[in-house]
Image (cartoon, rainbow, N blue to C red):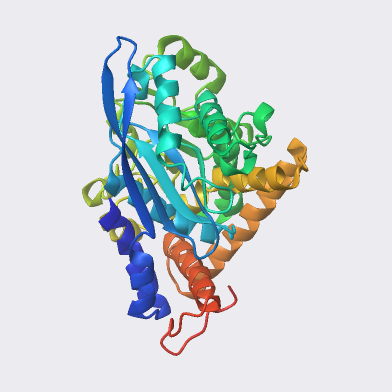
């Protein structure tokens, strides 16, 4: 995954004429730490888990990125996700670098007490990194709500002082921001609205969504309310399909009651959702699900990535050949980190914003960022993903230049970044 993530950096660097020295500066993380986390289980035994934190690059500010609890977590994945966060924060022009962390554990198999033990052990292991001016964690897979509350409490106890801005995604009662719970889905929808004409998506366009977690639900609901038809949804167990458009409220109730969208409507295999006919395909679950072979089988006009890295780099050329536009993850799912930035600002100033203010500022930042990506794509006659990487690389190079590194461009400048 990490190797694949860097492939797009090389392509953008070649387009801009960035020197090898600067590319090398961005090719490896600033700091990666692995730690053993001993946990006391409910049966009295000790289990040692592996925890990870990668601070990829801090040239634009303190590093920012989520913590995930999942069996697949490993050092390669964490470094790749931290790299993407570095690119993402630059695309939406936040004063942050990128980071990511996680624990290799099946959170669904833990009791609440055991889960709390993992959360607090993680903070103790990585406490030297966690700070509002150095590295600011946030929720990710299986670490929302109460898990972040435990982490916030642990860092406060360790430092013997309140540190609300050191971790974002907190419950509102602990200094969290209004709008954070829906920010990723809201942001994805705002990108869709801004790019609908470019993508050829008119009123009533059909949308297939792979995944039905929080971000996917928020996106699907907002799209349906705006007049799009959400015709297919899948999760890890199955899929639901209705060409006329799914009743999302009823589907959510069915998912909550049964644990799956399977059996709600239609007969569609879970894996077949990716190749079902639709106007817009939205991978919102796992990374790496669309390879070059599958890309040739897609029957959509465009892709909007809510998941991190759902399209493999090898599929990019195939999608371009098939004239399937891609709204990249580093833009489409940036709503979460944008509102995390808003939370950080509110924590530091003590000035907490109304929900309408958060929504307005999120919409304005995504409009500005989306337009900047489109401008780069049109200037360089490339797709939106390449346009986003070009924009991010311009801003990263400008920050490196401001700190005194010489010879970033071969005879060029940092543009208007």
Q: Nearer the viewer, residue 313 or 355?
A: 355
Work out whether residue 194 can be spotted. Answer: yes
Q: Residue furthest left?
A: 293
Q: Residue at x 46, y 61 (%)?
A: 384
The quadrant of the rendering that contains the C terminus is bottom right
Residue 342, compared with residue 386, is above or below; it is above
User: Which percent across, then down, holds residue 177?
Assistant: 67, 37
Q: Nearer the viewer, residue 279 or 257?
A: 257
Residue 406, compared with residue 164, is above or below; it is below
Q: Quarter of the image holding residue 180?
A: top right
User: Which percent across, then down, holds residue 16?
Assistant: 42, 78
Q: Residue furthest bottom?
A: 411
Across the whole image, how many numbered discs are drawn on residues? 0
Q: Nearer the viewer, residue 337 or 198?
A: 337
User: Which percent across, then down, holds residue 324?
Assistant: 39, 54
Q: Residue at x 41, y 87 (%)?
A: 410
Q: Residue at x 39, y 70 (%)?
A: 12
Work out whether residue 264 can be spotted. Answer: no
Residue 82, compared with residue 141, is above or below; it is below
Q: Residue furthest front?
A: 160
Residue 252, compared with residue 125, is above or below; it is above
Say whether residue 91 is left or right of residue 57: right
User: Which percent across, then down, holds residue 293?
Assistant: 21, 49
């Amino acid at each position: 995954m990490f190797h694949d993530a860097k492939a797009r950096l090389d392509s953008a660097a070649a387009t801009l004429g960035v020197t090898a020295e600067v590319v090398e500066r961005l090719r490896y993380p600033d700091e990666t730490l692995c730690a053993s986390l001993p946990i006391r289980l409910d049966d009295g035994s000790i289990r040692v888990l592996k925890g990870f934190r990668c601070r990829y690059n801090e040239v634009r500010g303190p590093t920012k990125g989520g913590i995930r609890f999942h069996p697949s977590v490993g050092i390669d994945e964490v470094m790749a996700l931290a790299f993407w966060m570095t690119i993402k924060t630059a695309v939406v022009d936040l004063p942050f670098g990128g980071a990511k962390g996680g624990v290799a554990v099946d959170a669904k198999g833990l009791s609440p007490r055991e889960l709390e033990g993992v959360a607090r052990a993680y903070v103790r292991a990585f406490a030297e990194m966690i700070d509002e001016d150095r590295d600011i964690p946030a929720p990710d897979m299986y670490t929302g709500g109460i898990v972040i509350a435990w982490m916030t409490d642990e860092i406060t106890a360790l430092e013997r002082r309140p540190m609300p801005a050191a971790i974002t995604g907190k419950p509102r009662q602990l200094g969290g921001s209004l709008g954070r719970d829906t920010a990723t889905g809201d942001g994805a929808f705002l990108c869709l609205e801004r790019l609908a004409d470019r993508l050829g998506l008119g009123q009533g366009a059909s949308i297939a969504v792979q995944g039905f977690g929080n971000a996917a639900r928020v996106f699907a609901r907002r799209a349906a309310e705006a007049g799009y038809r959400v015709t297919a949804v899948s999760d890890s167990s199955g899929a639901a399909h209705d060409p006329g458009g799914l009743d999302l409220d009823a589907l959510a109730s069915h998912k909550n009651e049964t644990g799956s969208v399977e059996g709600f409507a239609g007969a569609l295999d879970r894996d077949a959702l990716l190749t079902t006919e639709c106007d817009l395909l939205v991978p919102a679950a796992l990374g790496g699900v669309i390879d070059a072979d599958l890309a040739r089988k897609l029957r959509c006009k465009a892709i909007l990535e809510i998941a991190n890295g759902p399209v493999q780099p090898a599929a990019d050329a195939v999608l371009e050949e098939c004239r399937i536009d891609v709204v990249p993850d580093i833009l489409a799912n940036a709503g979460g980190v944008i509102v995390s930035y808003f939370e950080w600002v509110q924590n530091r100033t003590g000035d907490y914003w109304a929900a309408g203010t958060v929504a307005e500022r999120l919409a304005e930042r995504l409009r500005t960022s989306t337009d900047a990506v489109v401008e780069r794509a049109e200037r360089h006659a490339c797709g939106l993903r390449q346009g986003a990487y070009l924009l991010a690389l311009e801003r990263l190079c400008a920050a490196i230049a401001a700190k005194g590194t010489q010879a970033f461009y071969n005879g060029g400048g940092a543009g208007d970044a």
